[in-house]
């Protein structure tokens, strides 16, 4: 199906599209298609031709790598309002990792050819897109540095605070994906995640399955800040 006006609003807020004017953005969205995923699905595999990039409109997508022995490493979990795989179309033209869509997700698939052609013919647009992607990379590097400097409990606390939103009292919410995926997302082992949850229980964090209750979000924010 074609993107709805609400879909386009989300797309236009992503780093790549926010660097473009209205005409440029809509030109790239010609031929874009939206799909809703009722079940978990493999979107693409490492080595597949990178002829599309994507924006997550709802839900999440997991990017992961597999070793020769079949061991899995989570590279990133892409949430709603973010694009991914555009870097692959600028490089070797092959996806470097696997991508799995979580159930309930909604994605827009955008053909890479119009973007590449526009960048070749419009140097101003190329510079704007490059600057936008550089800002995204700097933000990602800053997040990686922050995670490496924190203990597992603090990493988990930051993640939960981001899910709780702007409330200052009690917050109840559902984890967006399995706890093993949460552990990979914040760069810790599942065993460390269990210990971190036990540590945060002292700060009023309760979990029942995938439902999390934070009794004092502001106290958790203070713990994040050390």
Image (cartoon, rainbow, N blue to C red):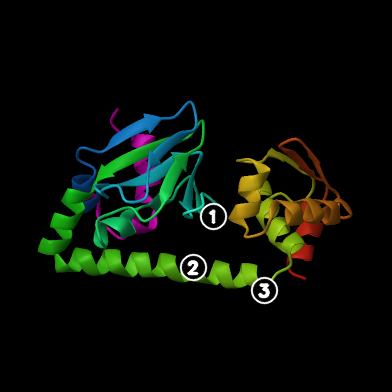
Mark carried by residue 149:
3
Q: Quadrant of residue 92?
A: bottom left
- Which disc, if any, is residue 139? 2
Residue depth check, mark 3 versus mark 1: number of the one nearer the observer: 1
Estimate the x, y position of residue 137 in percent, counting from the top left: 43, 67
In magenta stretch: residue 142: no
Q: Secondary structure at mark 3?
A: loop
For this rendering, which residue is in front, 61 or 73?
73
Give me the residue at 55% from left, 51% from top: 71
Secondary element at image label 1: strand
Determine which quarter of the picture holds residue 171.
top right
Q: Nearer the viewer, mark 2 or mark 1?
A: 1
Q: What element does badge 2 sit on? A: helix
Magenta residues span 1-22
Give whichever of discs 3 and 1 has the lower sequence position.
1
Q: Is residue 31 visible to the viewer in this orientation of the structure?
A: yes
Q: Quadrant of residue 178?
A: top right
> Nearer the N terminus, badge 3 or badge 2?
2
Q: Residues within 10 Å of mark 1 (few under 14, many from 20)?
A: some
Work out which quarter of the rendered image holds the N terminus and state it: top left
Q: Position of residue 59 (x, y in %)?
A: 51, 39
Can you give x and y, in whole percent of width and height, for residue 25 in the image? Answer: 25, 50
Residue 162 visible, this orientation:
no
Residue occupied by mark 1? 73
The relative height of residue 207 versus residue 50 in the rendered view (above or below) is above
Disc 2 and disc 1: Cα gap in Å?
A: 21 Å
Residue at the right extreme, as displayed:
202
């Amino acid at each position: 199906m074609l993107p709805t006006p609400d879909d386009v609003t989300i797309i236009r807020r992503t780093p790549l599209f926010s660097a473009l004017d209205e005409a440029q953005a809509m030109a790239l969205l010609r031929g874009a298609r939206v799909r809703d995923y009722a079940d978990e699905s493999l979107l693409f595999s490492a080595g597949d031709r990178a002829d599309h990039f994507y924006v997550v409109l709802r839900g999440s997508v997991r990017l992961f790598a597999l070793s020769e022995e079949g061991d899995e490493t989570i590279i990133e979990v892409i949430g709603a309002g973010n694009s991914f795989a555009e870097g692959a179309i600028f490089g070797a033209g092959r996806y470097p990792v696997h991508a799995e869509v979580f159930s309930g997700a909604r994605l827009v698939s955008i053909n890479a050819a119009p973007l590449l052609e526009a960048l070749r013919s419009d140097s101003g647009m190329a510079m704007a897109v490059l600057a936008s992607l550089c800002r995204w990379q700097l933000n990602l590097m800053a997040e990686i540095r922050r995670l490496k400097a924190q203990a597992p409990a603090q990493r988990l606390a930051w993640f939960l605070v981001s899910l709780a939103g702007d409330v200052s009292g009690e917050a109840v919410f559902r984890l967006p994906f399995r706890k093993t995926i949460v552990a990979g997302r914040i760069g810790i082992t599942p065993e460390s995640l269990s210990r971190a949850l036990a540590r945060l229980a002292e700060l009023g964090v309760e979990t029942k399955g995938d439902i999390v209750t934070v009794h004092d979000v502001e106290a958790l924010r203070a713990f994040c800040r050390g």
